[in-house]
């Protein structure tokens, strides 16, 4: 019918209904059910914020949802002027970015340099079996 989505056929009586086994499987199933576009998490050193913005444009134009770092703690700002507050904010932002990676279907690493934080993000993404792409594949720490 027009305006109504097709419903999945339930399994025959007596046949077990398979449930996603992990939170990641459950998230993937819900994203599929909602027919969401692919979600890309952009990672990289904050020295590449301009390149991340450009990658965001390209990925968005390609029809993907993009999540990326929202703060550059290396640039002066009153929100992180106090060193103690800045360190606490970095911990909070690192956790937030890991959540973005977990939400994403894939990761795009931007830039020709991989520091410790980006290396940890790549390892985390791969531990979740997320595909990882690079704007500069030669910096992939696993090749």
Image: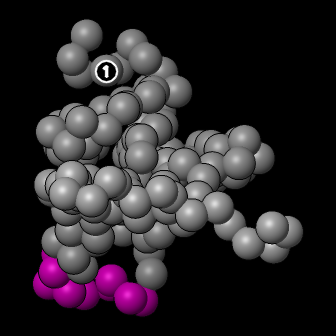
Q: Position of residue 9 (x, y in %)?
A: 48, 57
In this rendered view, identify the residue nearer to me: 88 or 6. Answer: 6
Q: Is residue 134 left or right of residue 16?
A: right
In this rendered view, identify the residue nearer to me: 40 or 74. Answer: 40
Q: Does residue 17 lie above or below 125 as drawn?
A: below
Q: Quadrant of residue 17?
A: bottom left
Residue visible at 19% across and 57% down in the picture: 14
Residue that mark 1 sits on: 140
In this rendered view, identify the residue nearer to me: 36 or 58. Answer: 36
Residue visible at 68% across and 66% down in the picture: 5
Q: Position of residue 110 (x, y in %)?
A: 48, 37
Classify the position of the N terminus by image quarter: bottom right
Disc tally is 1
Residue visible at 58% across and 58% down in the picture: 35
Q: Is residue 141 left or right of residue 103?
A: left
Q: Main SS type for the magenta part?
A: helix
Q: Does residue 121 lie above or below 135 as drawn?
A: below
Residue 71 in view in this figure:
yes
Q: Does residue 80 lie above or below 50 as drawn?
A: below
Q: Is residue 108 left or right of residue 62?
A: left
* Pointer 1 local density, CA inside 10 Å: few below 14, some 14–19, many at least 20: some
Q: Position of residue 84 (x, y in %)?
A: 14, 84
What's the magenta region?
A: 78-88
Q: Quadrant of residue 91?
A: bottom left
Q: Quadrant of residue 65?
A: bottom right
Classify the position of the C terminus by image quarter: top left
């Amino acid at each position: 019918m027009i305006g109504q989505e097709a419903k999945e056929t339930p399994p025959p009586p007596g046949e077990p209904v398979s449930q996603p086994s992990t939170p990641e499987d459950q998230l993937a199933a819900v994203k599929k059910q909602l027919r969401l576009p692919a979600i890309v998490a952009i990672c990289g050193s904050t020295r590449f914020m301009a390149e991340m913005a450009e990658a965001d444009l390209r990925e968005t134009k390609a029809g993907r949802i993009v999540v990326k770092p929202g703060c550059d703690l290396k640039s002066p700002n009153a929100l992180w002027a106090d060193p103690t507050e800045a360190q606490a904010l970095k911990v909070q932002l690192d956790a937030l970015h890991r959540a973005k990676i977990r939400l994403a279907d894939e990761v795009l690493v931007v830039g020709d340099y991989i520091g410790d934080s980006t290396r940890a993000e790549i390892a985390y993404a791969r531990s979740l079996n997320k595909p990882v792409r690079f704007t500069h594949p030669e910096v992939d720490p696993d090749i």
